[in-house]
Image (tube, grey):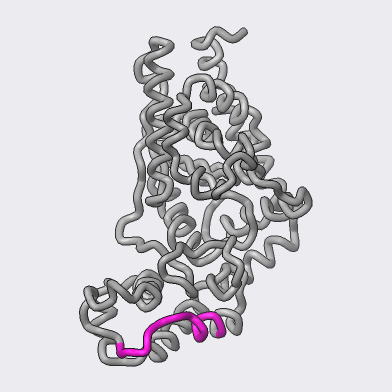
Amino acid sequence: MSKKKLVFSGVQPTGNLHLGNYLGALKNFVYLQKEMECIYCVVDLHAITVFQNPKELKNNVLETVASFLATGLNPEKSVIFNQSSVSGHAELAWIFNCVSRIGWLNRMTQFKDKAGSDKEKASVGLYIYPNLMASDILLYKATHVPVGADQKQHLELSRDIAQKFNNDFNCKDFFPLPEPLIPKNVSRIMSLRDGTKKMSKSEESDYSRINLKDNADEISKKIKKAKSDSEQIPNNLKLLENKPEALNLINIYSEISKTSLEKVLNEMSGKEYSYLKTKLTDLLISEITPVGKEIAKLLRDKSHLMKILEKGREKANIIAEENLKNIREKVGLI
């Protein structure tokens, strides 16, 4: 495998991937596998930073793999595996725990968000998981990482850790400084109930998101009940600045229809939001329900999914062990 351009990305297996995951990550993964060598990992070790029901976790890992395949990832072109099956992730994470600085982790805003007001009860894993994320990327010497705005800080930490390791052990350019791959023109997909919050599988109401497994009837009901606006659709984006739910629906329509926001507003201006919702529902049903059907079909043959994970593990482990051998030598581990 070439080391010139290598993409790494991971997805947590927390069940029910949704429209935000599809537009913000999965579609981009499929595009990237045509352009570069790619490693896509189901990051089950990250998932257990908060307690997971063991049976559900196993099912969610397989469902995530099924979602990868259903949206177009090809295991012959991309390496697909689950993180815990390659022990090098945890080994390198410990080494990076000793390279990374507490001050760096204290600046990580996601820990503050996820731990909430009672940080003393959060797991140590939740605090140090950015170091594990750095090990995920650097174990393969990945040069590029697809990231959203909320992950840029973690990628910067990975770069800091790589630079410090290279300096501490006098091995200039041993670890590359991974570059972010930020999808162009992809808007953040927000909750259908609250346009100020990102669409999330953790939000209590299922009406806040379009799940990849939703059927046509469920998609129709969710878009119908989605918050919008009582006024007609304007012809100017500035008039939507204080109407996040309405803007979110227009953004989703723009993404699914592959039409610029300006063209969408030209088409929709002066019309009621019910018109937009009808058009959006038809587009979503056409785009999402085939994915959901394919996920269901793939999940009926879990042995096939397990074989894909095993083949991916073998490929990933070859790269990981080769790099770890050099890492241990540089650190002085026998």
Of residues 81 and 177, which is closer to you in this image?
177
Q: Residue at x 35, y 92 (%)?
A: 272
Instruction: Count all numbered tags in the image, as a single digit.
Output: 0
Magenta-colored stretch includes residue 225: yes
90 relative to 248 in the view: left or right: right
Nearer to me, 207 or 256: 207
Residue at the spot x=54%, y=24% of the render? Answer: 97
Report whether 16 appears left or right of 242.
Answer: right
Relative to 331, does residue 243 appear above or below in the rendering? below
User: Considering only vertical position in the picture, is 231 above or below 287?
Assistant: below
Res. 261 visible in picture? yes
Image: 237 above or below 1: below
| Visible residue check, residue 82 | no
Q: Residue at image x 53%, y 72%?
A: 208
Q: Residue at x 55, y 79 (%)?
A: 219
Query: In the rendered view, would you say 334 is above or below 232?
Result: above
The spot of residue 244 in percent (x, y) is 36, 72
User: Residue 258 in the image: x percent, y percent?
Assistant: 34, 71
Rendered location of residue 85, percent (x, y): 67, 36
Judge whether residue 279 is colored magenta: no
Q: Which stretch is magenta?
A: 221-232
Quadrant where the C terminus is found in the figure:
top right
Quarter residue 230 falls in: bottom left
In this image, 164 relative to 40: left or right?
left
Picture coordinates of residue 215, whole percent (x, y): 61, 78
